[in-house]
Image: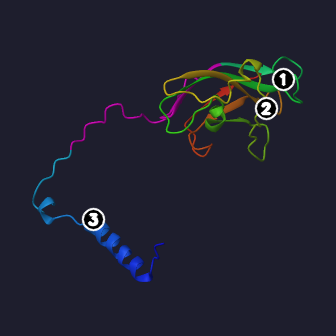
Amino acid sequence: MHRTTKTTTLVASLGIAVLAFTGCASPAANSPAPDETVTVDSAPIENAPAEATFEDSVLTTEDVTITITDTKTIQVGEPGNEYGDVPVIAFWYDITNNGADRDVTPNDFIFYFNAFQDNDPNAENELNVGALPDDQFLDSQLENIKEGGTVSNAVAYELTDTTTPVKLVASTDLGQTEIGSMTINLG
């Protein structure tokens, strides 16, 4: 059995530190002289991801593209809101994995969108996510989407009234910074 002593640990630590600091040092010959001109290639990177956008019902980010294909208000008891207590606004969409470094599922819509109804004079009225409005997605809503793959899904938000327009706001940071929005008139 090997015993590690304080001396062995100290020597090993010092050896690692010396190797690390040696790698950080660079010879002075590689640095340009103060009067030399350094040229930097500033051509755009090929296939560089564009800034996130939300236009014409399409959210495009580095990780995903979400295309809203349909929007519908569903009253209590109607198909898609059979068990709800309040009317909902439902969105059907296609979501594409653009090569994210994480798992992408059809339910990622709720990470990128927040819905609001401006019917409270004192506070923002963010709508709660409701039950899945379309049973055809029950088995697929949590599947991982392959890179380049596109999957359809739907989501619903619980309305606080059926007359005030709904503002759907897109962001890539859980609602902290608005990329864009769309307003849906009810009725």
Regarding mark 3 in the picture, which secondary structure is present there? helix
Q: Is residue 80 left or right of residue 112?
A: right
Residue 182, horizontal then vertical, whole percent: 62, 28
Q: Residue at x 83, y 17 (%)?
A: 79
- Label 3 and label 2: CA atoms lie apart by 54 Å
Please name the residue that numbered disc 3 is placed on.
24
Quadrant assignment, res 27: bottom left
Q: In this view, does 31 lie to the left or right of 79?
A: left
Quadrant assignment, res 125: top right
Please name the residue that numbered disc 1 is placed on.
81
**So how many labels did they put on this image?**
3
Residue 134, horizontal then vertical, whole percent: 75, 20
Q: Which amino acid type is shown beneath numbered disc 1?
A: Asn
Regarding mark 1 in the picture, which secondary structure is present there? loop
Q: Tell which of 72 and 108 is nearer to you.
A: 108
Regarding mark 2 in the picture, which secondary structure is present there? loop
The answer to the question of whether label 1 and label 2 lie on touching residues, with beta carbons closer than 8 A, is: yes
Label 2 packing within 10 angstroms: few (<14), some (14-19), many (20+): some
Label 1 packing within 10 angstroms: few (<14), some (14-19), many (20+): many
Q: Nearer the viewer, mark 3 or mark 1?
A: 3
| Quadrant in which the C terminus appears | top right
Q: Which residue is drawn at 58% across and 33% down?
A: 104
- Label 1 and label 2: CA atoms lie apart by 9 Å
Q: Can residue 32 be seen in this view?
A: no
Q: Is residue 49 visible?
A: yes
Label 3 packing within 10 angstroms: few (<14), some (14-19), many (20+): few
Q: Which amino acid type is shown beneath numbered disc 3?
A: Cys
Q: Which amino acid type is shown beneath numbered disc 2?
A: Gly
Q: Give the range drawn in magenta.
A: 41-69
- Magenta-drawn stretch contains 56: yes
Q: Tell which of 68 and 140 is nearer to you.
A: 140
Please name the residue that numbered disc 2 is placed on.
130
